Amino acid sequence: MEKILELSHLGKSFGNHIVLRDINFSVKKGDVISVIGASGSGKSTMLRCINLLETPTSGEILFHEKNIISKNNDIPSYRSKVGMVFQSFNLFSNMSVLENCIVGQVKVLKRNKEEAKEKALQFLTKVGMEPYIHAKPRQLSGGQKQRVAIARALAMEPEVLLFDEPTSALDPLMVGEVLNVMKTLALEGLTMIVVTHEMSFARDVSNHVVYMDDGYIVEEGSPKQLFSEPTQEKTKAFLATILSEK
Amino acid sequence: MISEMNFFGRILYILQSYGLSYLTGAGTTLLIALVSTVIGCLIGFAVGVIQTIPIQEGNERTPATFLLKFCQMILHAYVELFRGTPMIVQAVFIYYGLAQIWGVQLGMWQAAFLVVSINTGAYMAESVRGGIISIDPGQMEGAKSIGMNHFQAMTSVILPQAFRNILPQIGNNLIINIKDTSVLSVISIVDLFFVHKSVSGALYTYFESASIVMLIYLTMTITVSRLLRLLEKYLDGSENYELADCMDIGNQMHKKGA
């Protein structure tokens, strides 16, 4: 399969504090990659680096074999191909649900209003939020907001969609509605990188799991391999703790 | 003969003789305050937006960054200068200074609009900057994540929200301007306060004229503040929303598809 994204020797530090060390991994078309690990292990920072919301301090990010960290790279156009769904939704609070899903298409992709509206409705229907197109974000529940945020990202028709702990701010009932949407997208072949604490999603939906600790990738592999036969002591300890809690 | 009347009699007499002058003065005051507040807001938004442009990591030494920093420095000086000196002095300084140093003879109207506008701009710049940095950083990240550049994110997402949040500040500035145009009498603008000075000087009726002028100022400021409240309500929109009819959405999509 075609390789879309490759991180090579990626590093990030805030001052003297090193958050990411020598991260290497690649994403092929159709991959659903779960990134797991304790809080503070650098998984969110890695995801934010991929979308250049943080500037990496070393290494390369190759998107279709082109290094996107180089100076003269057009960052906004790259970002429009790599979508992001945030833990805190970040829907535009001055716009309705429909406008949230239209504005990027019109301003960034230069689609006309009609076409953008049609696309927006299509993806809002997919996440089951089409009855709420006239609502403002503040009038929605957390799970509803996150589904709109997913529709907003999908409306840009990105090649890869990044999820930064999309269910961490939700109560258990709402977690289900968001995970169901994500499962559907995975089955339809969307390329996804998901930072998550939902082990069931990592095990049952993704085809590749990355375990991070202290800024390193400790271990990666298929869900079966990582969950049933972890090779590293740290991975075993982490899985033992998190699975016993459930 | 006016000295033989009682308080209300004197007020009535003043209104009969000078009523129109007061109204014209009030009109002048309101005109200068409104126009200058609008121009001041435009200046304030421009300055506030430039001052909040972030310098990108890794780009600290490029010529563009240097230029940006230079602009921000100049604008910062502008804000400090016009916020830190009294408007009455600024009026004299600009009206006479421009003429003496550069030989630019501004009309007193031009000078009046100029002084009040740039004075308001200096205050608004800080309000706008405050409005922008008070917006949740997630809004900017959300905008960037779908590929908007800084300018698009500002105009579509951040500024509409910042504008709503600083509307009370704009109202403050407008009300302050209605009152503070009174200092423009130093450059011979015939505003409400100038009329008061002339009338009370001619008739020796300081208290009576002041009462009239107080009432006129208060009427103007309260009206303005009510109107701004209405604008805020309008911008907030409805607390309720209608569920869209799913069939309708389906029909719309089919029509396009067919």
Image: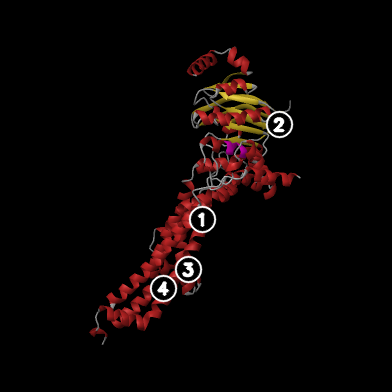
Residue at the disc numbered 3: B113
A34 left or right, relative to B33? right
Most foreground residue, A107 or A53: A107
Is residue A148 rendered magenta in the image? Answer: yes
The numbered dot on residue A65 is 2
Query: Is label 1 in a helix, a strand or a loop?
Result: helix
What residue sits 49% from the left and 71% below the top? B110
Earlier sequence position, callout 1 versus callout 3: 1
* Chain to which the residue tagged by mark 1 belongs: B
Whether marks 4 and 1 lie on the same chain? yes
Residue B221: x and y in percent read: 39, 65
Amino acid type of the residue tagged 4 in the rendering: Ala
Is residue B57 rendered magenta in the image? Answer: no
The quadrant where residue A187 appears: top right
Residue at the disc numbered 4: B26
What span is in magenta? A147-151
Separation (CA) of disc 4 from disc 3:
16 Å
Amino acid type of the residue tagged 1 in the rendering: Phe
